[in-house]
Amino acid sequence: MNIQSKIQEHNLKRRDGHRFQLQYAAELLIRKNIDFQDVVNKIKKFQIAIPSWALGTGGTRFGRFPAGGEPRSLEEKIEDVGLLNALNRSSDSISLHIPWDVPRDVPALKQLLVAHSLSIDSVNSNTFQDQPGQPLSYKFGSLCHTDAAVRQQAIEHNIECIRHGKALDAKVLTVWLADGSNFPGQQHFRKAWQNTADALAHIYKAMPDDWRMLVEYKPYEPNFYSMVIPDWGTSYTLCQTIGKNAQVLVDLGHHLPNTNIEQIVARLMHFGRLGGFHFNGSMYSDDDLTTGSIKPYQLFLIFNELVDAMTDPTVNNPSPAWMIDASHNTKDPLEDLLQSVQNILATYAKALLVDRAALAAAQLSNDVVAAEELLRDVFAIDTRVLVAEAARQLDGAIDPIGVFREAKVRETLIKNRGAKGVATGL
Ligand code: PSV
Ligand code: MN
């Protein structure tokens, strides 16, 4: 399938409708004294990595319903991300999970990445499952384990991840630990933190100087009484202990309901420690729904803080690694990823439109209503046309899901790969 010619065909069909909306948006921005092309350029630069494990259907404890045509190898996962990127021009990298994605033929993989204009975003270690043939079990934890031999095994696995990442020119190691306890009294909290800090420090030492280690937190699941790294504060204390290239990773779904995530994001950027971001949507907690599908205003408020810090020259936070982290149980995974990217970019675009000087003035004079109105006004603007224009200027699709359907991508994948294959991952 030549997706590029399908995109051109599709863009031509939608040209007039797109121009009509564009004219309105451009006029609106002029009235707000905002440079239209400047906003479009910023959207073009905002790239969101796709995790290898989100390309197939996920499941729950109760069942799994494969979409058909799921990628059966790392090579096919790269092809799928290449397709997404051709459509939206905003997904130019892929994150790997080891051992689900152990690279076999490195030179061939590198060629494939180049052919699809992709790079490797991060390597993610996995000590939350036991692998076949693994000598020691992670049933009672990995880096926090009471047994030094288990900790050592988990350290070595992370070092192996760094090795695979180096071979493919990655520069980020993401560590998410399922470690914790299910029952009161089971775990010594202080010792578990110390074991984890010591083990992470070992891994950190094995990392090249130009790499970053991202430490992800999660309040519960799979452990339901306590997690060793349940919150951003614990992640932050670990990162401070380990070194400057250790940074906190915020996953939107890893918070208890009603947590003020925008404030967490602002704090972390203030301290220069927001290293990475996992986008998804949720109603309750780690639901892995489409980004922005349930709480779009919250997503906007988060982006408002991100943009505020990103545009403040006094903030010294390295550019965070943006990634989607989702698991699709009912939707076509590729369509869901396209929807998520579009929601992320459209929300980012809204945050770019906030009048920061006016907001600062309203905050300074404690004009609560004016401050809130500035945000509400921007939130109500439909920015999807700016996202479409950014994609179009990069030879992507005005409506990526439209092309995906018109080109019968899923049907072709099923024909080529079969209806029953299940991608590696969760
Ligand atoms: C855990 O829920 C998580 O968010 C971590 O990022 C993992 O790496 C990913 O999901 C896949 O298991
Ligand atoms: Mn995550």
Image (cartoon, rainbow, N blue to C red):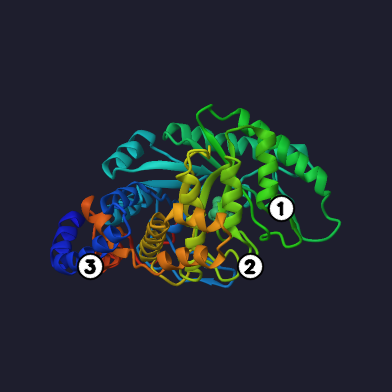
Q: Which residue is mark 3?
A: 21
Give the residue at mark 2.
257
Judged left or right of residue 336, residue 406 is: left
- The picture places residue 245, in percent across and down from the top left corner, at 57, 34
Q: Position of residue 268 (x, y in %)?
A: 60, 46
Q: Is residue 100 left or right of residue 146?
A: left
Q: Position of residue 288 (x, y in %)?
A: 52, 64
N-terminal of the two: label 1 or label 2? 1
Q: Nearer the viewer, mark 1 or mark 2?
A: 2
Q: CA distance from mark 1 to mark 3?
A: 55 Å
SS at badge 1: loop
Sooner in the amino-acid sequence: mark 1 or mark 3: 3
Name the residue type under label 1: Lys
Q: Residue 285 sits in which quadrant?
A: bottom right
Which residue carries the number 1 mark? 139
The N terminus lies in quadrant: bottom left
Question: Tag 3: Cα neighbours inside 10 Å, few (<14), some, or many (≥20)?
Answer: some
Q: Quadrant of ligand 2?
A: bottom right
What residue is shown at x 30% (from left), y 37% (from top)?
Answer: 111
Tell me which amino acid carries mark 2. Pro
Of the pair 171 and 29, the residue shown nearer to us: 29
Helix, strand or loop status at disc 2:
loop
Q: Is residue 224 found left or right of 72 in the rendered image? A: right
- Identify the secondary structure beneath mark 3: helix
The type of residue carrying mark 3 is Gln
